[in-house]
Amino acid sequence: MNDIIKAMEERRSVRGFKPDMPSKEDIAQIAEAGLYAASGMGRQGAVIVAVTDKEVRDALMEANRRIGGWQEGFDPFYGAPAIMIVLGDKSVATHVYDGSLVMGNLMLAAHSLGLGSIWIHRAREEFEQEEWKALLAKLGLEGEWEGIGHCAVGYPAVEIPAPAERKQNRVFYV
């Protein structure tokens, strides 16, 4: 079987991570893979913010927890030390689709490097808040950005789940 297709079939969402930070090289390689995602008309309307600073990660986690309505102490990132935020440029009509493809590439790249990942939502709501818009401004990101998702990345601390049975009758040929 082709290695890429094999990775697509084997990758699973991880809901428990070790505190050990992946190497800078691995984070950079994952981000680079994200940048090679297909995009509408090649406009490349998505960006990645790789969060490896624990204080920023924890503040982001707390914002995500509040938006999700979970009790204090819950970590919606499941302990992942690195959070790769994908944002879409609102001036690009396909920004949500483009960002979603970036997210897929990030998760497959993490898997290929022996790391776990999971797509965590609520980035849209976070980056509507002034605190997180200020972070983007500090990074030099001008314009209007929509949060697409968080790719939580790290070394799995749990057993990788088996794949769910695939539903039947989902492919139609004409």
Image (cartoon, rainbow, N blue to C red):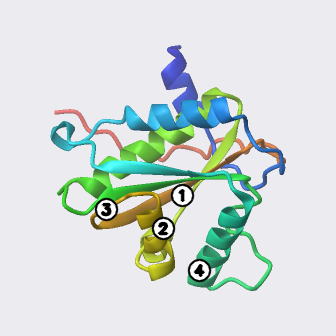
* Residue 51 drawn at (x, y percent): 61, 54
Secondary structure beneath disc 1?
strand
* Residue 6 drawn at (x, y percent): 56, 23
Secondary structure beneath disc 2?
helix
Which of the 4 image quadrants contains residue 37? top left
| Label 4 – label 3 distance at C-alpha | 27 Å
Mark 1 = which residue? 150
Secondary structure beneath disc 4?
helix
- Residue sitting at x 51%, y 66%: 121
N-terminal label among 4 and 1: 4
* Residue 130 drawn at (x, y percent): 45, 81
Task: Point out the frontmost of discs 1 and 3.
Answer: 3
Task: Point out the frontmost of discs 2 and 4.
Answer: 2
Q: Is residue 174 left or right of residue 110?
A: left
Query: Which kind of residue does numbered mark 1 sit on?
Result: His
* Residue 66 visible to the viewer: yes
Mark 2 = which residue? 123
Query: Which kind of residue does numbered mark 2 sit on?
Result: Ala
